Amino acid sequence: MFMKKRLMATVGVVAVIATACGSSTASTAPSASTAASGAPASGSPAGSAAASASANANLADQQLLKIDLTNEPPTLDPDKAQDSTSIEVLNQIQRGLVYFDKDLKIVPEMAQSYDVSPDSKTLTFHLKDGLQYSNGDPILAKDFVYSIKRTADPRTAAPYAYVLCEIAGSDKLLGSSTCNTTTPTPKTDADIEAALANFGVSAPDDKTVVVQLNTPAAYFLDVLALWIAVPVQEKWITSPNATEAENYVSSGPFMLKEWTHNSKLVIVPNPKWTAGPGPTLTEVDMSMLNDPATAQASYEAGDLDMVLTPAADLRRVKDDPVLGPQVVDQAQAGIGYYDYNTVKGPTANKDFRIALTEAIDKQNLIDTTWGGTGAVANSMVMPGMQGYQPDLNPYPYNLDDAKKHMATALAALGKTSCADFGKLPFGYNTGADHENRVAYMAQQWTKAFGCQFDQVGLEWKVFLKRRQAGDFIISRDAWGADYPHPNNQLAGIFTCGGGNNSSQYCNKDFDALIAQAAAEPDPTKQTALYNQAQTMMVGDAPVIFLRFVVARYEIKPYVTNYFGTPGDSQLPGDKFFETIQIAKH
Amino acid sequence: MATTQAVGRAATGRRERTGLWWDAWGRLRKNKLALVGLVGVVILMFAAIFGPMLAPYPYQDQDLQAIANNGFRPLPIGSPGHILGTDQLGRDMLSRLLDGARISMSVALVVQFVVLFIGLPIGAAAGWFAGRVDTFLMRFTDVIYAFPDLLFLILLSVTLRDTPLGQAYDGLLLVFVAIGLTSWVTVARLVRGQMLSLKETEFVEAAKAIGVSDRSIISRHLLPNGSGPVIVAITLGIPGAILAEATLAYIGIGVQPPRASWGSLIADGQKYIRSDPHLVLLPAICIAVALVSFTFLGDGLRDALDPKLKGKQ
Amino acid sequence: MKRYLVRRVLWIIPVLVAVSLITFFLMHAVPGGPWDQEKKLSPEVIARLNQIYGLDQPVYMQYLNWIGGILQGNLGPSYVFKDRTVNDIIAGGIPVTIQLGIQAFILAVLVGLPLGIVAALGHNRWPDYVATGLSVVWIATPSFVLAIILIIVFSVDLKWFPVAGWEGPQTWVLPTIALAAFPIAVIARYTRASMLEVTRKDYVRTAQSKGITGRAVVYRHMIRNALIPVVTIMGPILAFLVTGSFIVEHVFAVPGVGRYYLSAITTRDYPLLMATTLIYAFAVAVLNLVVDILYAYIDPRIRYS
């Protein structure tokens, strides 16, 4: 329920393209690393083939889309948002200099063109003519500057400020641990103002925005496509109740018409939108149904046009004669895996970890506890990304081999059976359907080796603290890609002392390879280095990889021309509702 | 506290004495509904004590092969080897229900024990000493009464979940204690009322005149004679406790998987209500039987222990 | 009586203070804070947030600050809904919850009282069994199960009502029924019990022996006296309804205050949590007072010093 919000954000449905602070490649080909070769969900989905051709004849009279936002958006202030709910709405009502197309490539949006300096450190954007906000005011270059600076301003406490680390002068503004530098955070207002004045975004005139970077980072364009870089009028955002519907100023293809808190949010086409094609839809109604079962019932009753299928219904809807054909499975840039504690308990022993890994039939696990949705994962980097290694599988399902490894481990640890270790704490967070997976795996390991487990289900934040403290021998984990680059999948999770390293895995050689790969300018060599690093890490089995995420949705057949991407927030095509058309039904 | 006690509030103290136990039993026997309740409670006790030993499978045993053969759907009622079907991991429903009986009966008993343990002394002290002690204790119970029980339950559970108390008995000890902590006010008030009225009676005055100690008076005269309404309140409080446990399970606090109480079975099963309704229907029926039995028995006890003492709940 | 009233009203204040103290410190004892999340915020951002919201001060100081705010009518900012104040959030949710509660209460009385009377009058015959059976089933079914059954039957299959939301009378029906089920059953049972008690009372037999017709006896004597214990149960029921079974609001997506209960705990939105707790405690205290007054009014035998 309420957990899903976080789960969705974690499952990487926000394609934030950012630099891993401090490490940047010198690649000048902006989207080479985002090449979605073989990515399952780019391109046209079922149902859109005929739509564009005979569009007008088949359109319904009422172009209304009804979806579920699942939760009240915590904020619609673009610079402060971090939540998938907020982002889904912001994607429609606010746009920036550039944006993504249906293949997640960067295309100009409010900028009609941009120049990249020879050293790739300066980006100059030229705005289109006649751009206006929904209130009729012109969109000026200084509004972009104001918005970006406001995000970076420590006083705003914006969660996504860290993506701006690449901008010149960020070290004086964003603080040392945000940007991995040694400069201390500015404390006084005077210091902050001074740092802001030196921050590398400027507007030399009303139609030009200049961004200066620390290092050549042409893929910084992806950062500018995010909601934190949309133009914001200072006089608007500083006025009281700015984000209420009656005061809200939109810049995107849609505008905010109505926001009944905790109940309903309505967006309609923005008549002042000129930067791109306008929406066919005349209205999008977003309800806030926390309960997935309620959402599913709403879909079946016809109150919703698209829904994320709840876990318990995954099989039922697929087998259902009416709902089955409406099922759409979409890959997402996310992975589920379980951490082994590599420094405490029997899991500190490598053979023990390998034994556990080889005792799980991952496909069966997916079929039984994930409704059959999702692809088996044996390594970290996700399909469709640079650095994906489909053949890397050193420890496939093999009970005999598993038992051999366990015997070796037991001998090394001086025990006769796994039960001798007592009840091993197996931690997970409640409220997100993990009990089944945990029970399944615990049962498999008990059957194979006699291990005993304490299945510890804790409330979300308590679980986070305990996992971070290393209290569990095995714990549930997951990762959603911030950007489609192996660095985001490997650094920080598997590097020594990494912020998201819950297995406490530490291999200096691995860290060295990662650092080397990050600095490697040649893409082919870079990929080879990441492959090498990943192979090394997977060989050490610090975690058991389980499943690359595939989400199951049900979509009414009359919803056409949506374009799902791995970067969707909550629903397929929710990066651009302006493409959606409702067919006659 | 108000809502958990709404179900269990029974007679407040009045001046009548409770009848002899034998008379009470005679009246109880004639009450058809109460007998039904009694039978139900006995069956539940039997299931709770012996059930898990008679269960065909261990409650956590997963028959994954059967699930795989069934298109990865839970087995319905009447499947070979699983007379009441299985859940989504192939665990036998009959076995889980029998284990759940043990848990639900434990809820009933342990919670009421906690309630007595706290409510009895507080109510007795308030009633016996009266005056300032009474005022202070009653204000204290007012605070507890006004406190939203659900909130308290959740906060307690979240805070203490990863302590030894929180992990004991598959997380249930914490649940029992928490529910008990939020439901003792009714019993306390009841005991106080009984104490207040009984201590004015003649035989107590006579005992005091003779010189019997206070403690002796309380334990040998007042408690046995005043216990009727308390017993009724305890019995009628059990349905509330069972339901509270189910609600906690729905929120995600409660018995730790793979263990399952009827409440947690309902909470998990209701997600499958359209595809596999037996997952929620079976435990719901069990809970209904338990609630009905205890309610009828409690009603019957109340009628039997004092035919004149009714209502005013 | 007046002195008693004044004393009771005054007592509400220390009760509320005690509740707020317990909640505040218990809340801060729960591990994890508002800024803990999976993709960790940087320490600078956390420090800044703590500073903005005063979380960097010692706990007792924060409590005093909060009390200070309360005295000025300011319930504080929300840690999660950063653009809104708790005052706004509560002000938006309370009317909805109260409306839902009142609707459920009216339904509960309209259905529960007759049900109980019918059961009592048909004591130990089929009306009694049916009514008692129904009410026991409703008590025995957890509200979340009842809610989803109502949705499936009436919204998805029969399409009589929308599934969820709170926009217009059509959406009011199912949540009201779901919320009223338990009170209906409780009211029915208590009405039946007290009616049965009253039938055995001497004054009823006296009236009957005097020859007053059966129905007159029922209406004039039995019902009025039977209402006494029922009034006592109204208090907790009203409190239960008004603070909105959080479950009904959750399942039907009703934008009331009850919905914030659980989410405020999970997200550690302390000000919102404090406010909703206080509202509940206040409602319970006031309603109990009202019930006690009504009680004294109805039953002349009771006198408060």
Image (tube, coloured by chain):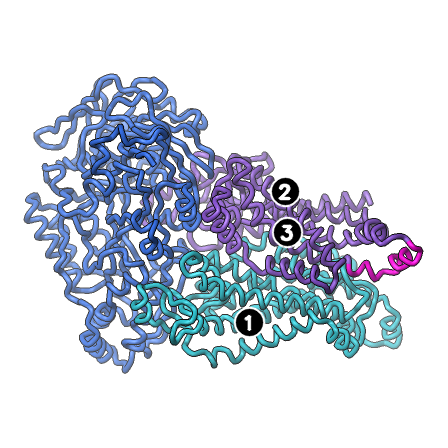
Chain colours: A blue, B cyan, C purple
Label 3 amino acid? Answer: Ala
Which chain is disc 1 placed on?
Answer: B
Q: Give the label, 3 or 2, closer to the camera.
A: 2
Q: Where is residue A243, by image quadrant?
A: top left
Residue B43 appears in which quarter of the rendering? bottom right
Q: Which residue is mark 1?
A: B106
Which quadrant of the view contains residue B66?
bottom left
Chain to which the residue tagged by mark 3 belongs: B
Residue A155 shown in magenta: no
> Image quadrant for the N terminus of chain C?
top right
**x%, y% of residue A385?**
16, 48
Q: Residue furthest right?
A: C210
Label 2 SS: helix
Tell me where residue A155 appears, x and y as whole percent: 36, 34
State the SS at label 1: helix
Earlier sequence position, callout 3 versus callout 1: 1
**Segment tinted magenta in the rendering:** C196-211
Q: Which mark is residue C102?
A: 2
The answer to whether C294 is drawn above or below residue A272 in the figure is below
Residue indicated by mark 3: B146
Q: Residue at x 38, y 37 (%)?
A: A66
At label 1, the amino acid type is: Ser
Classify mark 2: residues with Cα within 10 Å, few (<14), some (14-19) or many (20+): some
User: Which chain is mark 2 on?
Assistant: C
Query: Relative to the observer, which residue lies in front, B14 or A276?
Result: A276
Label total for image: 3
For badge 2, the amino acid type reads Ile
Q: Nearer the viewer, residue A404 or C59?
A: A404
